Amino acid sequence: MSSKENAKLSLCKTSTKLNKLSLNHGATGNCSIREVAGFLITPSGINNEHLNEGHIVKVAMDGTPEKNQSNQLSPSSEWRFHRDIYVHRPDVQAIVHTHSIHASTLSVLGKPIPPFHYMIAVTGGKQINCADYAMFGTQKLSDNIISALGIHKACLLSNHGLVAVGKDLQEAFDIAEEVEHLSQMYIQAKIIGEPNLLSDKEMDEVLGRFKSYGRWEKE
C-alpha cells in the first residue's frame, strides 16, 4: 500500500471514529492531510461511516481537485479553510473539523473558552478563541478562522463547530477530542456557578511544562 493510500485510509478511519464517538454525525465535519502541492480531504455529502479510500479527494493549493481521479466527487465544501490553514501554517500537517455537541453549543455564544482548566494549554494558548460567524464554505469564514486560530491548535467557529490542527492526523484528532471534553466541563461548571479562572502566570507555567509533556525529566 502506498503512502497516499495509507493517508486516505487514515482519513476514512478517523472520520468513522469521529462519528462513533459522537464528535460528528452523518456527513458533518471533515478531515484533511497535507500532501506535496496540495492536500487530501474528505468529500462533500457522504456519511462519514460509509467512506472508503476511493471517496477521498486530492485538492491542489489553488482549490482545484486533481484531474483523473476516479471518484468524480466534490471535496468538502470547507476546503478553503483547510487550504488557507496549510498556506499560513507550515507546521500543520492535518486538520480535523467537528460539529461536536458541546463545542458547538459554546460556539453559539461567540466567545472564547477561558482558562478555567489547565488542559486549555493543550491547544497551545491560554484560551480557545472563537472565530466570528460567516457562511460555511466561504472565504470570509476561512479568513475568520485564520485570525482566531493564530499560532494555536484549535478554535471554535461561531454558530458552527470546532477546528483542530496538528503535526499529524492523530494529534489533530486528539486535540478535537480534548476540546470537546473541555467544552462539556465548562458548560457543566457554568451551570453550578462561575468557574475560577487560572491567571496568566499560572497558564504560562502550564504552557512551559507542556513543552516537555510526555518526556521524562529528572527533577
Image (cartoon, rainbow, N blue to C red):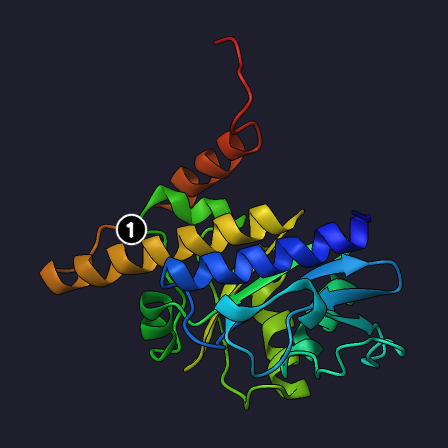
Examine the rendered structure and indicate whether residue 11 appears above or below residue 212.
below
Residue 89 on image: x %, y %: 73, 59
Residue at image point 89% right, 79% down:
67
Q: Left of 8 or right of it: where is 22?
A: left
Residue 201 on image: x %, y %: 42, 40
Q: Nearer the viewer, residue 20 or 118?
A: 20
Amino acid type, mark 1:
Leu
The picture quadrant where one finds residue 52 is bottom right
Residue 9 on image: x %, y %: 66, 55
Q: Left of 157 or right of it: where is 103?
A: left
Q: Left of 154 or right of it: where is 140?
A: right
Please count the marks in the image: 1
Q: Nearer the viewer, residue 155 or 198?
A: 155
Residue at image point 89% right, 77% down:
68
Neighbours of disc 1 within 10 Å: few (<14), some (14-19), many (20+): few
Q: Tell me the SS state at disc 1.
A: loop
Residue 77 appears in view: yes
Residue at image point 33% right, 70% down:
101
Q: Left of 215 or right of it: where is 89?
A: right
The picture quadrant where one finds residue 212 is top right
Examine the rendered structure and indicate whether residue 211 appears above or below residue 23.
above
Examine the rendered structure and indicate whether residue 127 appears above or below residue 29.
above
Going by the picture, which residue comes out furthest to the top? 218
Residue 92 appears in view: no
Disc 1: which residue: 197
Residue at image point 13% right, 64% down:
191
Residue 37 on image: x %, y %: 89, 64
